Amino acid sequence: MSPSRICEECGAPLTGGPLTGGPRAGRPARYCSGACRQRAFRQRAARRDAHPARGAAAPAQAPPAVTHDRGLGRALDSFVGRRPELARLRTLLRSSRLVTLTGTGGVGKTRLALEYARARPRGAGRVDLVELDSLQDDAELVQSVAAALGVGERAGHTGTDLLARAIGETSRLLILDNCEHLADPCAHLAATLLGRCPGLRILATSREPLRVPGEVVFRVAELSLAPPGSGNDPAALLRADAVRLFVDRASACAPGFRLDRGNGRTVAEICRRLDGLTLAIELAARRAGSLPVNGILAGLDDQLSLLADGSRTGPRRHRELAAAIDWSHRLLEPVEQAVFRRLSVLVGGFDHSAARAVCGGDPVASRQVLRVLCALEAKSLIVRVPGEARPARFRQLTAIRAYALERLIAAGELKDTRRRVVRWLNGLAEDAGDEVFADQAGGGLAAERDNLAAALAQGAPCDGGVHVRLALELARIRYQQEQPSAARALLARLVDDAGSRALGGEVPALAARVACQQGELAKALRLGERAVHEERPRDSPAGLANALDARAGARLCRGEFSEAVADLRECLTVVASLGNAHATAWCSHHLAWALLQAGGEREADALMSHCLPVLRRHAPWRQLAAALHTTGAARLALGDLNRAEELFAEVLRIAPGSSFHALYPVEGLAIVAAESGDMERALRLCEASAQARRRLDTEAEGPWRRRVEETAARAGARLSPAARRAAVVTARRLRGERLVAYALRGGYGGAGAEGGGADAGQQSPLTGREFMVAELVAQGLTNRQIAGKLDLSPHTVASHLDKVRDKLGLRTRTQIALWVADRAAHRPVPTR
């Protein structure tokens, strides 16, 4: 006998087995198994958390555990269907190192890749997402991959070689999203990295294969449709992923929306007309908040003539997507249409202020822009960018942005809109110009890197002075992101450009810093001297201070410490006259570091005692980390080991464990351990840091590097051969967060990592980052305050805190604080 009911979770028939066979307490069975029941429960719980007021929605696959790897954020809506595709993708990536998801735009390639990445088991390796759709040309590919991986260029190593050295033998999944317009360079990059990095796997999304040897091509098909004989039975229709997706998205816009016999046939027809294309279905489903389903179907019928507007020989699914977007566009109000098309020039995304600056103007009033953005997001014509950006950023999906750009050109507004983009970017640049040391400030323009690059590449209408200013700002961003090759290419055109003379020494000063980053020390000093020479005749104390600081940096790199101290003393005098407390503190820190290299530790310590409190209040975390390290190095030089250890530990609590910023304090703690007599710990930290520096291809300044090498040699000489070998073996397991946790005496070196040393017996299930969050909770900080200290989002902090609670079996912040206090009370004090 054919079943009359199906499982609400997976669509399988209910056959009356022992798990779900009959009514329970008078209620009919709803699920075919306990697993489906649990998945449905987790899905409902997740929806209640995200949408407390929403009613019941159609069954959907339970969201996988979210990873917190670089570039991945929590999905903002549920993932419906695609179970066979996910299973096949898991199988393919177990046996193949390059898998390319192909398919038409809007079919769901990117979402499938991200869901696979989020569902990877812990310990499977890091995941990095690189979004390529905003890139303008081949030259930016490697730079964008490096930025996504957090890899900065080092002297003598650039491009693909740099990436290969940074990845090394680590286990890692690299997602290259939207490769089709850069297919050739993506293919070459993938082939090179896979050949040199045995632990690397690449998952690419593209509208065409990359054609790399060993590539496995996985075509992502459209969502399954209801079979022709399904009629209007909701149970039968919900077996189709396309119908389930429509119902899920429609219920999000129209709480209470359900599939029933009255609308089932119409919903199935909408999905069929849209050919099961994910993006088109989502666009149509968003109309459920304002139209009945028969109105949505009628709207599609009215627009079918638009299929001929594109290529008559193109795939039907492409034309259907264009029809869906065009129809959604036609349903917009005139003001919404104007904002929608003008946003297409912002290839790097945008926040509210950017949209207001670029989209304002007849018929759009500035006060209307926020409301329109909300409306466009609700209609899926823009999407919120996942991540930690504050304020929230949005973007248009590639296919939608291409359509919107066509509408912008047709409206004759392309030139004026690009002019507004330049005016907006120039305003941001002028605001950033208030910084005395703008090259090192890391201002708000960094978020607009892709928009800056696009404005310059597209030849946006602007005069020579504005063009130079924008190019300089883009070069600054590249320098701050440790991409000196890209910065150098921009600066090479500016150094001898007559239009750059109005900027005084800003261009040669930045060029000097870039040359230092690339190890071209003679060139760096030459450019630094030019910057000072060009600034002295000008009435610009800030410009002169910046030039002096740049020349001092070149001299420090060359080992000319007394000359660097002289430059920085003059710089400090100039900056002090400006009354800018933050700039004065930052310059004082630079002078203190130079004095340390020159043997003036007492004066350096006195300077840091005055400037560190200012930097604590005002500086971004990179500047604060550098200042804390300088203060710790000064206290170390003066023999104050306890205070030095506290300062180095504080740096580790704010610097990412995978960053080279974390290596200086690790080395400082190694020196402290050696001076305290704990030679095993000192050697472990020295060896772990040395291995990390080799992986990151970075070196410390000469005097500091020699001090660390002397410490490692002294510790090794004081240990027996067996203890020395054990320390080196243990150090190989200390990477990233594990190294940070061990350095902070969290005992995370693994079983036996401490070898019975000072931290023995202090094992904990927490990762290094979780332990940092727990410590800050114990200090009484809120999630938002912790987020500010660790440069995370409050959402990420909350996620870490949930894991702390689960692992420790604690429920309240007070219990966590007591756990931290108890751990500190029982931690042995290292012997001197």
Image (spheres, rainbow, N blue to C red):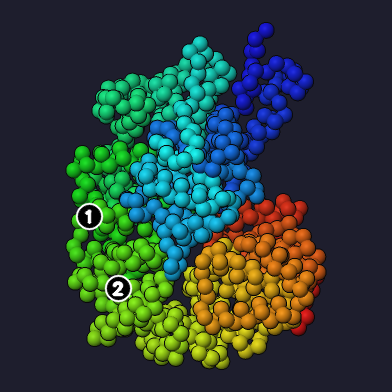
Residue 56 x, y percent position in the rendering: 58, 31
Quadrant of the rendering where the C terminus is positioned: bottom right
Residue 790 can be seen in this image: no
First in sequence, mark 2 or 1: give its number: 1
Looking at the image, which is closer to me, 381 or 636? 636
Helix, strand, or loop for circle 1? Answer: loop
Residue 429 x, y percent position in the rendering: 31, 66
Residue 558 got which mark? none
Residue plotted at (65% across, 9% down) = 2
Residue plotted at (36% across, 80% down) = 522
* Extreme residue toward the top, this view: 1
Residue 459 got which mark? 1
Looking at the image, which is closer to me, 139 or 415? 139
The answer to whether mark 2 and mark 1 are in CB contact below 8 A is no
Residue 545 x, y percent position in the rendering: 35, 83
In the rendered view, does 11 fall on the left or right side of 432?
right
Looking at the image, which is closer to me, 557 or 470? 557
The residues tagged by marks 2 and 1 sit, at their Cα atoms, a distance apart of: 21 Å
In the rendered view, does 673 fall on the left or right side of 424?
right
Helix, strand, or loop for circle 2? Answer: helix
The quadrant in which residue 501 appears is: bottom left
In the rendered structure, which amino acid carries the disc numbered 2?
Val
Q: Residues within 10 Å of mark 1 (few under 14, many from 20)?
A: few
In the rendered view, does 297 fall on the left or right side of 674?
left
In the rendered view, does 272 fall on the left or right side of 737?
left
Could you tell me how many numbered marks the image carries? Answer: 2
Would you name the residue on which mark 2 appears?
Answer: 507
In the rendered structure, which amino acid carries the disc numbered 1?
Gly
